[in-house]
Amino acid sequence: MFRLGLRNLLGVVLGPFLLTQIGCATLFGWDIHAPGLLSEEFARDIRPSPDRVALYVPEGMTAFVSTDKGNWHSDPQTYHIGEAFVPMLIEAFGHSFEEFILMEAVPTQAMMQQYGIERLVVVELKGFRNRKNIRGQGLDIFTETTVFGPDLNLDSRFETRGASEAPKVFAKKGGPEVNLNHAIEGNLRSVIAYVQDLTAVSNPQTTGRVA
């Protein structure tokens, strides 16, 4: 006969309930997934540029994660950065340039000529820093952006840091996720501002600018 002790019975009954209540907290720490959406302020603050720009996302960037927990006594933390960064990156470029092309294959000169692309932009995640302390948390997202001309010659390369500071992050539901999302958006604002300025210098007739 199958017998189930009280301890096992409680595990069966309470187990699923506890897992649903934990949310982003797991048995081994925090598993943090950002919403992956730009804020309404992004669309309001940044006016689209009329330039024709293509974006290429390096393979594997969606899988970019960090286990930087900030300090030695913090619970383990896993930040799924790439899965939120990539859709936000595409959304940012789609909004910020009236003529936007997402390149799904490694671009060639023939492809640049075929689609009449003026600028090709490649954005790569390069680093993440968790500045966790007793009062709150600061996050830094580091990227490197490379811009190529229509002949695929290098136009510019620059690094960008996006930061977010929030008090009592882990004391409120969704706090770490929102903080990560905000840091990503801060980085993308800087990337877009630089690329828009670069295209405006090359094409003085354009008027797209960060408001």
Image: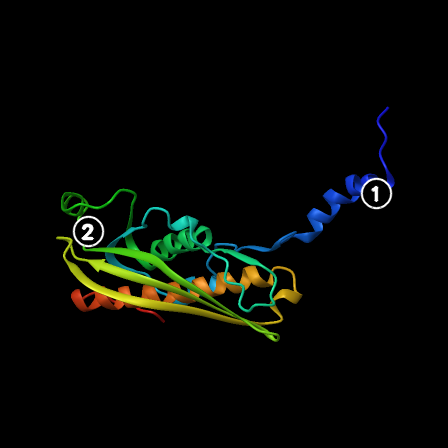
Q: Quadrant of residue 143?
A: bottom left
Please identify the quadrant where the C terminus is shown. Answer: bottom left
Identify the amino acid type marked 2. Ile
- x and y, in percent, of residue 67 in the image: 50, 58
Which residue is nearer to you in this view: 210 or 78?
78
Residue 60: horizontal and vertical position, in percent? 37, 47
What is the spatial separation of the Cα atoms under label 2 and label 1, in whole angstroms?
Answer: 65 Å
Mark 1: few, some, or many residues within 10 Å (few <14, many ≥20)? few
Q: Helix, strand, or loop for circle 2?
A: loop
Q: Nearer the viewer, mark 2 or mark 1?
A: 1
Q: Position of residue 135 (x, y in %)?
A: 61, 76
**Element at label 1:** helix
Amino acid type at image mark 1? Arg
Badge 1 is on which residue? 7
Q: Residue at x 22, y 66 (%)?
A: 198
Residue 88 image label: none
Q: Label 2: which residue?
A: 117
Figure quadrant of residue 12: top right
Say whether residue 24 is visible.
no
Label 2 crowd (10 A; few <14 / some 14-19 / many >=20): many
Give the quarter of the figure containing the N terminus. Answer: top right
Residue shown at the point (31%, 67%) measured from the top left: 159
